[in-house]
Amino acid sequence: MLRLTDELNGAETYETAADLTEHVLDPNDGVLVRLSEFFEAAAEQAKASETDAGWDLSYDFLEAAATLSSLGEDLHEAAHQLRALDRLAKPSWQTQVANYYATAPISRRSGSPTAGPAASSAAPPPTSKPNRRR
C-alpha cells in the first residue's frame, strides 16, 4: 500500500492515477475486497472463542467488512472517472500563454503610425454635449 500511495502521489497523468487506483478498487482482486475478506476472517476467529466478547468483536469485524464492501461499490467507477479527467483537464498556464501568442493577431511594430493622414486630421469635439454631467 505504501508503494501504491507513493506511486499515486508521483503520478503525472490521470491515466497513471487510474491504473494505480484500480489496484485498490478492483471488485474481484482489489485491496478493498481483500481487506474486507480479512475482516470477515477475523470475525470468524473472534466467534470461535464462543464468548460474549468474541461475538461482540466479530460483529465489529463484520461491520468493517461491510463498510469496505460498500465503499468499493460506491467507488466502482472512480478509475474511469480519473481517466476522463485527462480529457477534461485545463492546459497549464504556460500552455495557455503559448496558445494565446500562437493565435494572437500580428501587430505592426515598425516606427510608422498605423493610421493614415485622414485619421490624424480628425479634431476633438469642440465642446461637451449639453445635459451631460460628469
Image: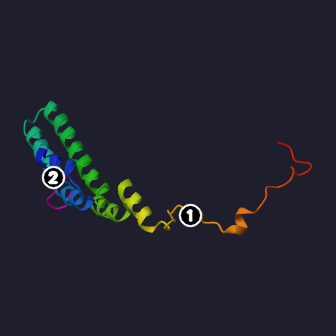
| 65 to 108, vertically: above or below | above
Q: Which of the 4 image quarters holds residue 43?
A: top left
| 13 to 59, vertically: above or below | below
98 to the left or right of 41: right
Question: In this rendering, does residue 49 appear at all?
Answer: yes
Q: Locate the C terminus by quadrant.
A: top right
Which label sits on residue 112? Answer: 1
Give the class, few, some or many, for how many residues have Cα within 10 Å of label 2's Cα (few <14, many ≥20).
some
Residue at screen point 13% across, 34% down: 54
- Type of secondary structure dominating the magenta stretch: loop
Q: Nearer the viewer, residue 64 or 123?
A: 123
Q: Position of residue 116 (x, y in %)?
A: 66, 69
- Residue 31 among magenta residues: yes
Alpha-carbon span between mark 2 and mark 1:
70 Å
Q: Position of residue 76 (x, y in %)?
A: 28, 59
Give the class, few, some or many, for how many residues have Cα within 10 Å of label 1's Cα (few <14, many ≥20).
few
Label count reads 2
Q: Nearer the viewer, residue 134 or 17?
A: 134
Colour pattern of the rendering: rainbow
Q: Amino acid at mark 2?
A: Val
Q: Position of residue 45 (x, y in %)?
A: 8, 41
Magenta-drawn segment: 25-32
User: Disc 2 or 1, which lies upstream in sequence?
Assistant: 2
Which label sits on residue 31? Answer: 2
Q: Position of residue 27 (x, y in %)?
A: 20, 60
- Residue 120 among magenta residues: no
Residue at screen point 72% across, 68% down: 118
74 to the left or right of 58: right
